[in-house]
Image: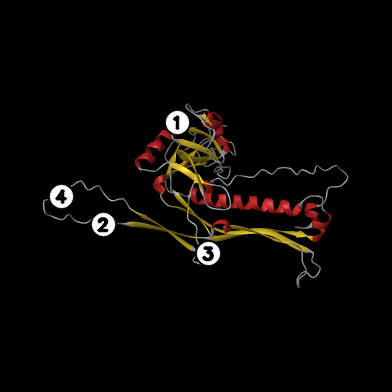
Amino acid sequence: MLYSDISPRTNAYADRRLLTRSVPNNILGQFGQVRELPSKSTKTMMFRRYNKLAAATAPIAEGVTPVASAITKTDLSVMIQQFGSWVMITDVIQDTHEDPVLRESVDILGEQAGETYDLLRAGVLKAGTNVTYSNGAARDAVQTCISVEVLKRIDRYLLRQEAKRMRSIVQAGPNISTRPIAEAYIVVCHCDLKYDLEAMTGWIPVQEYATQGGQIQGEIGAWGNFRFVIDNNLTAWADAGAAKLTMISTTGTYADIYPVLIFGRDAYGLVPLGGKNSVSTYVNNPKASDSDPLAQRGTCGWKGYHACVILNDLWMMRLECGCTA
């Protein structure tokens, strides 16, 4: 970060209260099954699921020991990767700038870390194999918005798969913990879809909930067994649908298609390394060294290990739909 990048304001009054940045929330970290990977162990986490036994519907013959049921398991492994970023802060900036640059640098790097993780999780979860469409049988046929009918279809599917509804979410903060919520499937979507949701019969906006406790970060409302949360990192595939009709279109020809992620409990897993140390910040004030004998350069940065993995495709769904213009 050179001085010219954030030069002081001159010849004008400067409000000491800096402008608030627009930053997407770290939404998808709330709904996954979190399994902390201990430090100094390995880079790979193994998730294991023992599969359901078939119902024992045949009567047991008198005096005859029945055949033992065979227990089977499914193992899913994921390898953590390291991510991070940093900025340079010179001694001149620290000595002469009127803004609290170091504090602001720590803040924006923390926001960058949260958005980075959310984008990484979105990339994994959007690649799930369980998909349905607001109309048609493929993405390039879609030209309608989200509707009550398609939500009923998804609800029926998840119930058939015995997908459990969410009863808790991951509590925001440096340590891994949870807090309870009312049972529901979670729907995460882009804010562009908010107006189509509000037009659905039976939609309940969050401000009209019977109780204002236990709300989810980013939550905007509910319909049936679903609670809806906004995450603007779930951007649309531009012009990926059919003729746009009344849908939003980047070029004005084909409908932009939005991914809508619907989760039951334990549909996906999150693996940080070492709990509160899953993201660490580093601040180095300018100090003399062989490479910087005049103590002109300091740094501020973050790094962390993380992974996201789908644990059960049958307990989640990706809906692809258009958005009314």
Asked if residue 199 shows in the view, the reply is: yes
Camera-near label (3 vs 1) is: 3
Mark 2 and mark 4: span between their CA atoms? 17 Å
Question: Is label 1 in a helix, a strand or a loop?
Answer: helix
**Of residues 141 and 218, the one drawn nearer to the viewer in this rendering:** 218
Q: Earlier in the sequence, mark 3 or mark 2?
A: 3
Q: Quadrant of the N terminus?
A: bottom right
Comes first in the chain, label 3 or label 1? 3
Return the residue at label 2: 70
Residue bearing mark 4: 60
Residue at image mark 3 = 39
Task: Name which residue type carries label 2.
Answer: Ala
Q: Is residue 80 left or right of residue 76?
A: right
Q: What amino acid type is highlighted by mark number 4?
A: Ile
In the depicted view, which residue is nearer to us: 225 or 4? Answer: 225
Amino acid on which the number 1 mark rests in the picture: Val
Mark closer to the observer (3, 2)? 3
Q: Position of residue 288 (x, y in %)?
A: 78, 69
Residue 245 showing in the rendered view: no
Identify the residue position indicated by label 1 in the image. Answer: 148
Crowd band around label 3 with a 10 angstrom C-alpha radius: few (<14), some (14–19), many (20+): few
Q: Is residue 7 above or below residue 219?
A: below
